[in-house]
Image (cartoon, coloured by chain):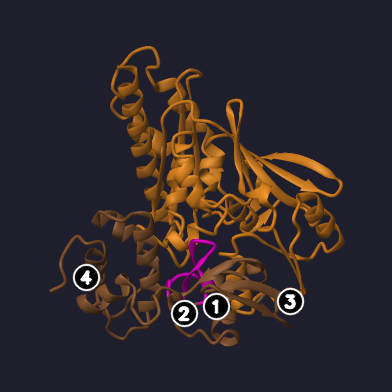
Chain colours: A brown, B orange
Amino acid sequence: MKLCCTVNGEWCALDDVAGSESLLRLLRERLRLPGTKNACEQGECGSCTVYVDGESVCSCLVAAGQVDGSDIVTVEGLADGADAHPVQEAFVSAGAVQCGFCTPGLVVAAHALLARTPDPTDAELREALAGNLCRCTGYEKIFDAVRIAAGKTEAT
Amino acid sequence: MRFLRPGTMAEACALKAEYPDALVIAGGTDVMVGVNFGRTDPLVMLDLTGIGELAQWRSSGEDIHIGAGLTYSRIVAELGDALPALASASRTVGSVQIRNRATLAGNLGTASPAGDALPPLLAADAAVELVSAGGARTVPATEFCVAPGRSVLQRDELIAGVRIARRRGPQHFAKVGPRNAMVIAVASIATTMDPANRTVAVGCGAVAPTPVRARAAEEFAAAALDWNGEAVLPKGTAAEFGALVADACSPIDDVRAGARYRRRAIEVLAGRALRRMWDEHLRRVE
């Protein structure tokens, strides 16, 4: 099928898309945007989190055909040119990255949380990031990063 | 493969009549897992997310009409006051990312006995609206699922929405699983109380081949509760209620839990639900 959508502000028209393939595959293989990670392909890990029409979703569970006409933002679209987004800066300053595989998904999930709830409680923070698995950090540094991004604590 | 994306329900019904084997997709959070792992390789997919009206809810007298495409995130955000049990259950579905896509009708279409939103539909006497090119029919939620993964939905039919009564009193939902998020229920329960009509209703999940009502427990509670007075729950009432709810269930051993554990879990959850609803009822009476 022919597919048109906006990805990180850029209009894309794609031919010969299999409507049943996942948005994740479309982003990584067709659009060469490898920031969005492929891990579980069943919505369990959150590594593939992107925005579709302003909502954070697992791109592995969205069929490509469903995003015809949609506005998609991936982790590559959060930075302002060469300047990292404050959420990304906070992940760096908190040391919230170890192997890094979960980081793009967590950055988008944290971005989505703060867009909706700029000053989250710890309970809200945990609930909002419950769908993103990290096997390295034990999450504490990740929570620190979100607190820094929310301006609740200073980077050390 | 063909990917069909109708803009109206009438168009969708016509396409389902033409392609009865089309794989229907809305939120995709269940369907796409099968597609990603090659368990389903659809020749035709029928996507309902292009139908704006399906993603809406509206008040209709004492009922709320929920369109098949309304996401759990919106149920949590918009229907917590009117439908507390359903909103609580919705909040336990997957993660934020899942709730932003997944729909109430998806739980019905999948017809899993563990579908989080199904016990609240049963406990509120909800009705499921089905449509096809040939017409429409309404099925009580209690009769919708017939076996694990199987429902009364016919090949040419689509789920249009659900009609569910606005709360008439305290409601409760609880779910047991290994984590607070991202779990398929080991046991779940939704309960509703209607003090004006002196009734209690119970829907149980993951403890039988389909979600089930616990009628004997409901009748027991309706008779045992002191509807006229403001008395605390008589001693032993919650325990007996819990035992009767467990008797209505027929759990199995599987990878997630054993039958004995499930039976005990639903018994405890039921007793707790009755106590919490009655406490809330008394606070309202005061």
Give the quadrant of residue B243: top left
Q: At 39% across and 38% down in the image, what residue appears?
A: B242
For label 4, the crowd category at 10 Å Cα-Cα, with few meaning under 14, some 14 to 19 and many 20 or more, is few
The residue under label 1 is A24
Are dots 2 and 3 on a single chain? yes
Mark 3 or mark 1: whose residue is earlier in sequence: 3
* Contact, mark 4 vs mark 3 (Cβ under 8 Å): no
Query: Which is more foreground, mark 4 or mark 3?
Result: 3
* Mark number, residue B152: none
* Contact, mark 4 vs mark 1 (Cβ under 8 Å): no
Q: At 59% across and 30% down in the image, what residue appears?
A: B63
The residue under label 3 is A2
For label 3, the crowd category at 10 Å Cα-Cα, with few meaning under 14, some 14 to 19 and many 20 or more, is few
Secondary structure found at label 4? helix
Membership of B229 in magenta stretch: no
Q: Quadrant of the N terminus of chain B?
A: bottom right
The residue under label 4 is A140
Q: Which residue is at the far left?
A: A156
The residue under label 2 is A36
Spot occupied by residue B179 in the image (x, y as percentages of width and height): 34, 61
Residue B248 visible in rendering: no
Span highlighted in magenta in the image: A41-59
Q: Chain of mark 3?
A: A
